[in-house]
Amino acid sequence: MASAEFGFNLISSQDLEGVTVFDPNGDEIGEIDHLMIDCVSGRVRYAVMAFGGFLGLGHSHYPLPWSSLTYDRERGAFVADVTEQQLHDAPEFSDDSWSDREWERRVHEHYHARPYWDEQPGGRTS
Amino acid sequence: MASAEFGFNLISSQDLEGVTVFDPNGDEIGEIDHLMIDCVSGRVRYAVMAFGGFLGLGHSHYPLPWSSLTYDRERGAFVADVTEQQLHDAPEFSDDSWSDREWERRVHEHYHARPYWDEQPGGRTS
């Protein structure tokens, strides 16, 4: 996938909605419902996934930190570095969560994702 | 506007569609139709604007480099640092343009926007 970094990967925000999300084993677990974008920096911070009953989860929408997703150019899909258990146990969210740093901290910690607001180089926090 | 940099500015990709775009004089010139997102880096590279006949332009959709837009938190809108003449004279585009660096170079030059692929710190190129 390294070559994708230097290729062209521009996709319309409309076309990203509905893109399939696989788990690391290659099983389809859902699709992108929409993205949460920082409209000052122009950076995608979360992908809100929709699960069409794949996992029998209680909620239908789950925000994932953008850094838990990897774009798979060949399949035109995303791979989410999350487990079914993590989705089951994910922190509750509401519309207020998008301006609640404490919630953001919890959800990033939950998925072992690097907090984007630290903007430190390097990989995951754990 | 500096405070917005440190605030919460997360907006759903769906809600960004239809957001008003003003020119630097405060006149409404159009709205966001959709965004072009690099799905590897998670960065917005272009906003494709729709002009509802405001300027009598020949085309109805114009891609603007993301860096020509500034989010105005108070108005919940964008300000585009472009002139009517620039829109009139904008390089033609097609679906192929999104993987054509030469076109990207032309369009960034046209709007005096910093080429994002250079990723250099500092401001506009001219």
Image: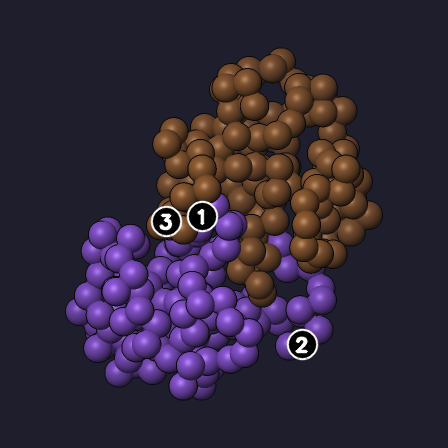
Chain colours: A brown, B purple
Please name which of the two marks, 1 or 2, marks the residue nearer to the observer: 1
Task: Residue under label 1, please give it.
Answer: A5
Q: Amino acid at mark 3?
A: Gly
Chain label for disc 2 = B
Describe residue A115's horizontal placement relative to residue A75 as left or right.
Answer: right
User: Which quadrant is the C terminus of chain B positioned in?
Assistant: bottom left
Q: Residue B96: image x %, image y %? A: 22, 52
Mark 2 is surrounded, within 10 Å at the Cα level, by few (under 14), some (14 to 19) or many (20 or more) other residues, namely few
Spatial separation of the CA atoms under disc 2 and disc 3: 33 Å
Q: Residue B52: image x %, image y %? A: 30, 65
Describe residue A63's horizontal placement relative to residue A50 as left or right.
Answer: right
Residue, x 34% and y 82% (percent of image)? Answer: B83
Spatial separation of the CA atoms under disc 1 and disc 2: 31 Å
Q: Amino acid at mark 1?
A: Glu
Q: Quadrant of residue A15?
A: top left
Q: Which mark is residue A7?
A: 3
Which secondary structure lies at badge 2?
helix
Residue, x 37% and y 56% (percent of image)? Answer: B33
Q: Residue B55: image x %, image y %? A: 27, 76
Residue B87 seen by the camera: yes
Which secondary structure lies at badge 3?
loop
Q: Which mark is residue B2?
A: 2
Q: Quadrant of residue A64?
A: top right
Q: Quadrant of residue A18?
A: top left
